[in-house]
Amino acid sequence: MTDISGIVAKMTLEEKAALCTGATSWTTTPVGRLGLPELLVSDGPHGIRRMPNVRVLTQKSLPATCFPTASSLAATWDTALLYEMGQALAEEAIALKVDVILGPGANMKRTPLCGRNFEYFSEDPYLAGELAASLINGIQSKGVGTALKHFAANNQEFERFSINAEIDERTLREIYLPAFETAVTKAKPWSVMCAYNKVNGTYVSEHHHLLTDILKGEWGFEGFIVSDWGAVHDRVAALRAGLDLEMPGPKQARVNAVVEAVRNGELDEAVLDGAVRRIVRIISQAAQTAKGGGFDAAAHHTLARRIAAEGMVLLKNNGLLPLQNPQHIAVIGQAAQLAHFQGGGSSHINPTQVDVPFTELQKLAGNAELSFAPGYAMDDCLNPELIAEAVAAAQAADVALLYIALPDSKESEGYDRPDLNLTQQQVALIQAVTAVQPSTVVILNNGAPVVVRDWIDGTAAILEAWMMGQAGGGAIADILFGRTNPSGKLAETYPVKLTDTPAYLNFPGENGEVHYGEGLFIGYRYYDAKEVPVQFPFGYGLSYTTFAYSNLHVSDTTFKDTDGLVVSVDVTNTGSMTGKEVVQVYVHDQKARLIRPYKELKGFAKVELQPGETKTVSFTLNTRAFAYYDPAYQQWITENGEFDILVGASAADIRCRATVNLQSTLQLPSILHNESTIRAWFNDPVGKTILQPMVVELMSNGGLFNNSDPSYIGMDKLNFLLDLPLRSFLHFQEDFLTQPADDIADMLLRQARSVRQ
Ligand code: BGC
């Protein structure tokens, strides 16, 4: 074990300051005399983007496997598979001499318009957290580090370097932080990357509450916090807030500023030492993994194909799929020849090889004859000739396969999407082809939902293939021909149209600010609450077989929050093909003091079943599965009461339910204050016991609130009374009191606060 403190103690002030800012675009500053090597980091997240020259920010990276991007990974709902992919990523990192992979990204899909959603998992924090944790665990199991990013609230690309995200505390805690919290607590990433943006007025790189109080304090994060590339504005302020490593470098002025700040007393050297200790510890850890050698590119390509197939979501199927020996297949769409398998920006991988979808199809098509028409160009211009050519090909075939890829201009890191539509040409193409060929399958390559309502009706089937990684072309063929039974399910809702989406009126913000006005209600939480119909719900995806759910069982109908609850259900494959089902558990709180989403995902499992086979799937729901964050108490709380356990095949397809009674073991302090209303007093268990006898007595003795004859004021006085602060209520009653109203109010408050609930 390296003597971290010993190394730090021997470092000069200049060396310590230099270690906290990168030496190059991708490495930290080595300290040769103490035997401390550099640390080399590379993007991430779905492949290794290792620059041949670490001094250069962007150049063609060394070849590496391009796995499917996060939207696709999330749609697998398969934590074991993500772990396996993590191991493969680590093997490549080792071969390419990379110590830390910059990823995964655990930001929430607040709106499908975010250009970078392809790099993020889900609209649901539970799902995103579990997946991120598995991927990190897989990578780190091989002695390679990760940088969980972009902490926090980097949910749009518009003005991402400067936008101020205004988010209330509860929404942050329940929606935007939990995926990070789960990943940090379950997988202990070596580092966390802070976001560019501001949260509630402060750059995250200078956000003490987020970086130090929450991440390092509450969650016990022990690695180092690295800035996103260029996210630091004031180096000294950032260090004080908890930002350990600034990237990229070199930036001598920043190093000098830190030295100067320590010398003039502006920065406590202990703060610098803390950052240095965290970085040195990870560098020492990384040095224990011997680097170099090769990796099995063919095996990783095969793994990439398996993952891609697991993530593809069959959105519609009238029975055409799997294809039954068609004799003549019209393959239409440029993406059949030029695979669209990844997104633009810092995650762009130089793949080891790329499967051409057309070629892969041909390999499985037996004696069928395949024709090809490009159908569209990657711009948004209408081209009737390309459509006419495609229509002729479709007419001459038994089946038309339309490969539709969203162009880079419509989604990428760095800018948000202008809309949720395919290009005009693509829509016109689908409409024209489906008009002449009812056996048309649309295969989509995109990183986030598209609007399908203008063209879905004419199609026989739709396969969401995502940005599917370098082996995705083969995975599509596997699914179309039934070599793989589709088992992906959506990790994000497909809305009917853009104006239905939760953040529509609060995105992308103006005058430098974006208000998260929809609060907790993103994704299915919003569509549930507003009863807005969706195109395809969260958790949805078809299979070539069918599944039945039965025997929902809960470990107890009445349970203590601290004991948790075990839920089990039987799932049976009722069709004739082996398949996998993603079973989802949602929790619905029947009554809470604060508004809650109708239901929230708290468990999921992917199970493989042979035809006729039944398996029992179990889930453990802990306290947090029933809790919500109450800003009044500044903590997660549980309340006594009934909860429904909803088990289903998607957010809109609940197959079994059970009601359980939770007994909270929490001892909460009273939050009654000077201005608390009678309602608040009555909602507070201690407050109620104290106040009720007095109110009953006052109301029966006459006075303004005597309820004996309501007719002369024409209102329900009891209802009116509930919203009066206790103090005002007492003032109105002063004629009937034996002491001044204020004295009584003070006394009651003291009593309430002295008793813990
Ligand atoms: C991106 C990060 C990335 C970094 C290094 C930034 O612009 O936001 O995700 O890891 O660049 O390429």
Image: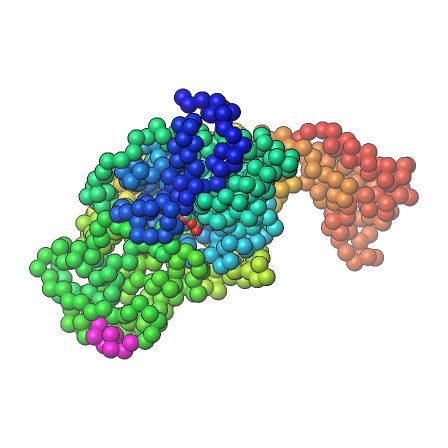
Quadrant housing the N terminus: top left
Where does the magenta region start and end? 383-391
Q: Name the residue located 41 percent from the left edge and 44 percent from the top edge.
A: 24
382 with respect to 640 (left or right): left
Q: Nearer the viewer, residue 5 or 662?
A: 5
- Residue 557 location, x and y as percent? 48, 33
- Viewer-nearest residue: 637 or 704: 637
Image position, residue 41 (x, y; %):
38, 41
Position of residue 80 measured from the top left corner of the image (x, y, whole percent):
32, 37
Q: Residue at x 35, y 28 (%)?
A: 288
Q: What is the quadrant of residue 445 in the picture?
A: bottom left
Image coords of residue 169 (percent x, y): 59, 45
Callout count: 0
The answer to whether residue 634 is visible is yes
Residue 132 in sight: no
Q: Residue at x 38, y 46 (%)?
A: 55
Q: Main secondary structure of the magenta part?
A: helix
* Magenta highlight on residue 564: no
Q: Is residue 220 above or below residue 385?
A: above
Q: Image check: 590 left or right of 580?
A: right
Examine the structure image and report whether residue 386 is included in the region drawn in magenta: yes
